[in-house]
Image: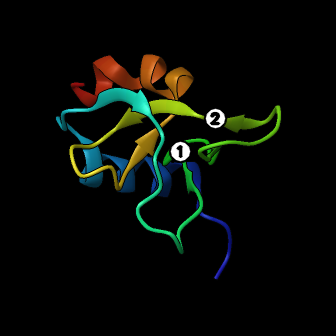
Amino acid sequence: MGEETQLQKTERLKRQLKGATLHYKEYTRHSESWDHDHCLVCWAKFMESGGVDILNEGYATDDDRDWVCASCFHDLKSAMGW
């Protein structure tokens, strides 16, 4: 399967997060076997600690399963109803 198109990404994001409540918080992993997550929009990496390109904070759903970086959150908050 090929790379997801921008239209497909937008539609998936709308299904998952349109109108969701997101909270700005420090990233914490789900379990000992899970070490990172990605921004659902731009694929930036979230980890508890890491290098220059690693995010340690962002916007997450109540269950901490879906993460959006601050840049994408601000770009999309009106369109997504956040």
* 32 relative to 51, above or below: below
Marks 2 & 1, CB-CB < 8 Å contact: yes
Q: Kindly identify which residue carries mark 2.
A: 55
Closer to the camera in the image, 62 or 35: 35
Identify which residue is drawn at 68% across, 75% down: 2
Q: CA distance from mark 2 to mark 1?
A: 9 Å
Is residue 46 shown left or right of residue 58? right
Where disc 1 sits, the SS reads loop
Quadrant the N terminus occupies: bottom right
Residue at horizontal 52 percent and vertical 43 percent from the top: 41
Q: Secondary structure at mark 2?
A: strand
Q: How many marks?
A: 2
| Residue depicted at 24% across the width and 25% down the height | 82
Q: Is residue 61 left or right of residue 27?
A: left
Which kind of residue does numbered mark 2 sit on? Answer: Leu
- The image's colour scheme reads rainbow
Q: Crowding at label 1, few (<14), some or many (≥20) Cα neighbours within 10 Å?
A: many
Mark 1 sits on what residue? 39
